[in-house]
Each structure stands twice: as structure tokens, then as C-alpha cells.
Image (cartoon, coloured by chain):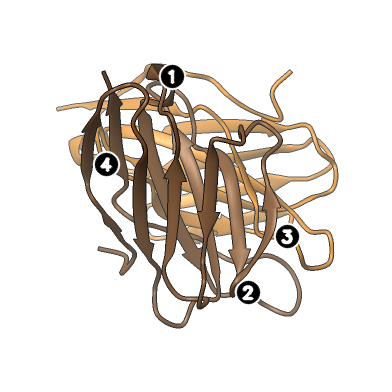
Chain colours: A orange, B brown
Amino acid sequence: QKEVEQNSGPLSVPEGAIASLNCTYSDRGSQSFFWYRQYSGKSPELIMSIYSNGDKEDGRFTAQLNKASQYVSLLIRDSQPSDSATYLCAVNMQRGGTNAGKSTFGDGTTLTVKP
Amino acid sequence: DTGVSQDPRHKITKRGQNVTFRCDPISEHNRLYWYRQTLGQGPEFLTYFQNEAQLEKSRLLSDRFSAERPKGSFSTLEIQRTEQGDSAMYLCASSKSRDRGTDTQYFGPGTRLTVL
């Protein structure tokens, strides 16, 4: 079992719809969670970070975290063709300093938004 | 552009050759990370530095790989005796550590290595 799991997709939604991306993680010590967007051939770009249970909204993006169920999700409202990319979920553990910053990534979900 | 730069952006080499990559982090960031990414996979952690100290190195990393950050600013990643399996995108990220919790990493554009 991978430490961070995502559905590989592809996930296809029509323009204007809500895209829902999910991620589960295995380490209950995980404390910080990140969503990155990665266009083909480019490096990951940070979209959202979330640390506490519940929802966090930033523009068209909402991250949801449930530590008890060990899942984190990303909702993209009013999806646009420019949102078509691979979305990576990353999880960090907090161990009091030294390796707190190390990120473990899922393999990503490919999203296609059709005009 | 996150402010993290990497050089070169592309490198083609023959099997058995040594290669070296450079990463310049965001200036006020004290942490620097190296990841490797192959097609269809997420970035895989290689190693990271806090200032000039290398605090963790992946157990998956062979001894052909070495990284340095001599003055706590830029970092280099060297691969000796390259193999075709080393072909990947090598990503550098930097962050500013906080007293508690974790920090947000910003990625550079990556160096794409092709080993023939």
C-alpha cells in the first residue's frame, strides 16, 4: 500500500462543473496536507495547504481534511479548460523539527475539463 | 516563477558519465529539498538540507548520488556513473522553516535528465 493514494483518473468534467479530487494517506502522524497542480512537462505548483480538520476555501478551490478518516480532498468549482492538469496530493509529518518538511506525494489525478 | 531556479533545464548524457545539477532557492529560505519524478509518478523524496546540514537522505538513494549545500545557499546534486534508470525530472524545492509545524515548499522548474 502506498503511503499516499490518489485515483489516477483520468477525471473528465464539463466546463463550469465541480471537479472533486480525493486523496487518502496511511500515516496517522501526518499533520500538513498540500495540493499541487502540475501541467505536462512542468514542475508542481502549490494550490492549497490545509492543516486542520474541515474546509478551507481559496477562490474556486476548496480543500477538505478529515484526519479521523485519513482523507483530504480538493474541490474545483466552475471548472475551466485551463484547470486541465495533474493534481498531486502531498502529505507531511510533523516530528518536532528535523524531517517535518519532507513531503510524500501521491501519483496524481489527471483532470480534463472539456469546453 | 516561484523564485527557485535550476540549471541546466535539460541534460542528455551517456550511460556511465557523471552529471551535476544546481539549485538556487528563494533567498530567505533555509530549507532545500531534492525530489525525483518519473512519468506517471509523483515526486519522490531524495534528500533535504536545513541551512548547510543534510538532515535526511532517502534509503532508496544509491551511493552514486550525492548532494551538497556548502554555504547554506545553493545546492548541487551529483549522479556518478549514470544509468538509464536515472532518467527522470529532478526537482528542487525550498521552504522557510517555522518553529512549529511544517513549511510550504516551492518548486523550481526542474532538470530533465536523459541517459542514453
Mark 2 or mark 1: name the one nearer the start of the chain: 1
Residue A49 shown left or right of residue B107 in the figure: right
Q: CA distance from mark 4 to mark 1?
A: 20 Å
Task: Tell me what residue is drawn at x 60 percent, y 56 percent.
Answer: B48
Q: Chain of mark 4?
A: A
Instruction: Determine the secondary structure under disc 4.
Output: loop
- Amino acid identity at mark 4: Lys
Q: Chain of mark 2?
A: B
Q: Which of B49/A10 is in front? A: B49
- Amino acid identity at mark 3: Ala
Task: Tell me what residue is drawn at x 26 percent, y 33 percent.
Answer: A84
Residue A61 shown left or right of residue B99 in the figure: left
Circles 4 and 1, Cβ within 8 Å, touching? The answer is no
Percent from the top left, x then y, of residue A95? 83, 59
Q: Can residue A18 be seen in this snapshot?
A: no
Residue position marked by numbered label 1 in the rendering:
B85
Percent from the top left, x then y, of residue B59? 71, 35
Q: Nearer the viewer, mark 2 or mark 1?
A: 1
Instruction: Determine the secondary structure under disc 3.
Output: loop
Q: CA distance from mark 1 to mark 3?
A: 29 Å
Circles 2 and 4, Cβ within 8 Å, touching? The answer is no
Circles 3 and 2, Cβ within 8 Å, touching? The answer is yes
Percent from the top left, x then y, of residue A16? 26, 36
Q: Judge the density around disc 4: few (<14), some (14-19), many (≥20) Cα neighbours within 10 Å.
A: few
Q: CA distance from mark 4 to mark 3?
A: 26 Å
> On the same chain: label 1 and label 3?
no
Residue position marked by numbered label 3 in the rendering:
A100
Residue position marked by numbered label 4 in the rendering:
A42
Instruction: For the N terminus of chain A, give its image quadrant.
Output: top right
Residue position marked by numbered label 2 in the rendering:
B97
Instruction: For the C terminus of chain A, give its image quadrant.
Output: top left
Q: Can residue A10 be seen in this snapshot?
A: yes
